[in-house]
Image (cartoon, rainbow, N blue to C red):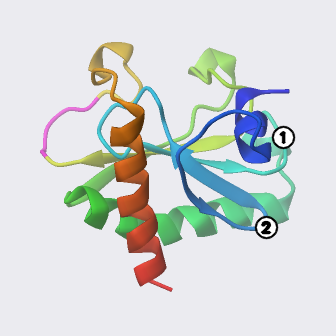
């Protein structure tokens, strides 16, 4: 079972910011920026082109729903949004997922460059960020 499926089922830790019937969102533990969130489908599917239509529609509905709350919680005006579709494209976990990376400054950005990753943070720090994002999501309901 992949790590994302384990996070969804609760057998692996994750800093959850949102969930519904078809999607699940949690903080990336190796973030490119604070608030870097992963949105995944509950269905274990490796590639976007193999997702049933209902799941791909739900994935992008959740993406649209979370953009504003993530930006407000992190106090940023923009986000980078990305999907690595297949191992050769840089997909590290073989489970469809969308990266939402808060951005505060203009300029060139490398989407998943490991060098760009920020220093490790404490569990308390991740819990605080997840709570901020959840609060913003709840405020938009």
Position of 126 compared to 96: left or right?
left
What percent of the width, then of the height, locates residue 15? Answer: 53, 45
What percent of the width, then of the height, locates residue 4? Answer: 71, 36
Q: Does residue 54 lie above or below 123 as drawn?
A: below
Q: Which residue is mark 2?
A: 21
Occupied quadrant, residue 53: bottom right
Occupied quadrant, residue 116: top left
| Highlighted magenta segment, given as a residue range | 105-109
What percent of the width, then of the height, locates residue 114? Answer: 38, 15
* Magenta region, main secondary structure: loop
Q: Residue at x 29, y 62 (%)?
A: 73
Nearest the viewer among 4 and 54 is 4
Q: Residue at x 46, y 65 (%)?
A: 134
**What secondary structure is marked by label 1?**
loop
**What secondary structure is marked by label 2?**
loop
Q: Which residue is mark 1?
A: 44
Q: Does residue 16 lie above or below 92 as drawn?
A: below
Q: Does residue 69 lie above or below 93 as drawn?
A: below
Separation of marks 1 and 2 at Cα, in angstroms: 14 Å
């Amino acid at each position: 079972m992949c790590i994302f499926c384990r996070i969804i089922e609760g057998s692996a830790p994750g800093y959850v910011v949102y969930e519904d019937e078809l999607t699940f969102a949690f903080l990336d533990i190796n973030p490119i920026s604070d608030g870097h969130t992963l949105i995944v489908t509950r269905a274990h599917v490796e590639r976007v082109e193999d997702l049933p239509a209902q799941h791909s529609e739900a994935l992008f509905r959740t993406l649209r729903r979370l953009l504003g709350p993530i930006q407000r919680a992190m106090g940023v005006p923009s986000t980078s949004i990305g999907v690595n579709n297949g191992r050769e494209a840089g997909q590290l976990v073989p489970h469809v997922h969308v990266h939402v990376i808060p951005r505060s400054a203009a300029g060139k950005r490398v989407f998943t460059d490991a060098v760009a990753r920020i220093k490790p943070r404490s569990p308390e720090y991740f819990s605080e960020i997840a709570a901020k994002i959840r609060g913003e999501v709840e405020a938009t309901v």
